[in-house]
Image (tube, rainbow, N blue to C red):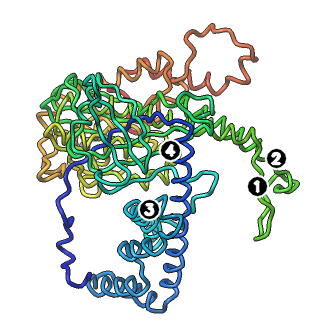
Amino acid sequence: MGSKKQPQQSTPPKQKTPTFLLELPLAVEAGQAARLRGHLEAGRQFYNAVLSEGQRRLRRMKADPAWQAARAIPRTHTQERRAAFSALREQYGFSEYAFHELARELRVSWLAEHLDAVLAQTLATRAYQALNRVCVGQARRVRFKSRGRGLSSIENKRNDTGLRFVVQTQDEGRRQGYLLWHDDQLEALIDWDDPVVTHGLSQRIKYARLLRRRASSPRAQGADREGERYFVQLILAGVPHHKPKHITGTDTVGLDLGPASIAIVPREAEVRLEPLCAELRPDARAIRRLQRRMDRQRRAANPEHYDNKGRVKKRGKGAPRWKQSRGYQATRRRKAARERKLAAHRKSLHGRLVHQIVAMGHTVITEKISYKGWQKRYGRSVGLRAPGMLIDHLRRTVASTGGTLHEVPTRSTKLSQYCHGCGKTVKKPLWQRWHHCACGIGPVQRDLYSAFLAAFLDPAEPLPSCAQYVVPWEGAEARLRAAHERVKERANEGQVLPQSMGIPRAGARLPESRSEPTQEPAFPLRRGRLEAWKERENLRGLSPGSIQGTTSY
Ligand SMILES: [Zn+2]
């Protein structure tokens, strides 16, 4: 079937209508919870059965000599390669369609009582997508759903039969929403005064998704006896509610996003250099503490799994299972709850930043960054602050205000290397936080300078050599300096800032006064800090103009 299509015309097959989500908690009684658990357990076993058969098909397909032959076809022969792979997929039944067939065969006897055909189909699609990631090399293996963790969500494709959400008007004219599944009506807790909720419920519901989340403890609010909470996610047609307090600017904004910081340079208004999601630090620290505690608890419960140096032993096939103590399970629940809290906190921080950017302007220009590469390079920091999610959020919000986010390719723009004064591109090492060129431009903090270059790019032809920088620079230079001055003030106030911002590390953690009482012997322990302090004292005396471009801090 792939051979019929022209590979150049691989536009999405059908125009998708915009979609957004609304999540509502469900009030679930004990009897209902028991039935939900039964349905979800059937779903879990069904999912595992599809996954297992799918995995068998994938293995057999990859073992076929024709698979190696198909891989050997050069990538330039797009058509031929595609035809070879799709013939193999057809032969071994490895396609979404074939998985739906498989779902039909597997949904028999007692499973059929728990799962309607459409729900079985969406589970089969999920299993196919997981295996397809392995097939195309995006993942190494698939994960079967264990009995302990269970299936945490199940969804329909439509909202007219099976699992579905309805809003009913009661006698007194009060409206109430219910998730219907089999014979159960699960009441949704709806705040009708919340404009986000009322807007969402006035849209067409495409389909509903039931979510089960583990609460931090069985005593947590809204949790059932097993410590589980249920939610409904409505997949709605249209665009999310736009809060009127959010104003939209008309400026053009250049962004430079780093793994831990962001530089925001509008063409006209005030410039900002900010740490990214600094407020998440305490959450992240608490999660790491819980993680260490889990490690200790697991170690205490499973001494036989460690050698005498405390390393985990290599495990053979028949090795004993890992034991999970009650304490370990409790810590794991607390950690999961903390992680969800962190994710919600991050989302609100992203939202705030996005609205601040959109308030400046609805045309945003930034370099497209490889978040995968960042993940490899900066791991934990990127995982915590999720700059990729921030950009996704920004893209959606900018689009909903009628503006555009332009992501220009880094490879061609090289904003972090460019100098508009002489037009040269010079690669800066990572430690060099300043742009200071022999042609007289700078010194200016490099992220701010990149964002400035981005702000004045022509989105139609995003090359710095094509942009006109000389006149804007006169107006922007002072604004960029002012932004960095504010960063320095915050560092002096004791705020911890990312190194990339060009503030000497030790300086960012100075005590408020030099006479601060200390219990440790001052000199041997604080030596490094004192030395760094001295350097900083010297720096303070210098005007920004006298800092050399090669200064290494
Ligand atoms: Zn230059």
Q: Please name whichever residue, 310 or 224, is drawn nearer the observer in this view of the structure.
A: 224
Judge left or right: residue 543 versus residue 169. Answer: right
Label 3, on which residue? 123
- The disc label shown at residue 261, or none: none
Label 3: how many residues lie within 10 Å, few (<14), some (14-19) or many (20+)? many
| Nearer to me, 375 or 164 | 164
Whether residue 440 is visible: no
The residue at 54%/27% (across/down) is 221
Do the residues under discs 1 and 2 have CB atoms within 8 angstroms? no
Q: Is residue 72 visible?
A: yes
| Among numbered discs 1 and 2, the one appearing first in the sequence | 2
Identify the residue at horizontal 46%, vertical 29% (top origin): 278
Q: Dividing the picture into quarters, in which one does residue 283 lie?
A: top right
* Residue contact between numbered discs 3 and 4, judged by CB atoms under 8 Å: no
Ligand 1's quadrant is top left
User: Residue 441's image quarter?
Assistant: top left
The residue identified by callout 1 is 322
For disc 2, the marked residue is 301
Disc 3 residue type? Leu
Whether residues under marks 1 and 3 lie with C-beta atoms below 8 angstroms apart, the answer is no
How far is mark 1 from mark 4, CA to CA? 25 Å
Instruction: Looking at the image, tell me whether mark 3 or mark 4 is earlier in sequence order.
Output: 3
- Asked whether the residues under the numbered discs 3 and 2 touch, taking CB atoms below 8 Å apart as contact, a structural biologist would say no
Q: CA distance from mark 3 to mark 2?
A: 36 Å
Residue at x 17% of width, y 44% of height: 404
Amino acid at circle 1: Trp
Residue topped by disc 4: 212
Tell me if mark 4 has few (under 14), some (14-19) or many (20+) residues whose alpha carbon lies within 10 angstroms of its own.
some
- Residue positioned 44% across, 39% down in the render: 231
What separation in Å lies between label 1 and label 3 (alpha carbons)?
29 Å
Q: Residue 237, percent across and down?
A: 22, 46
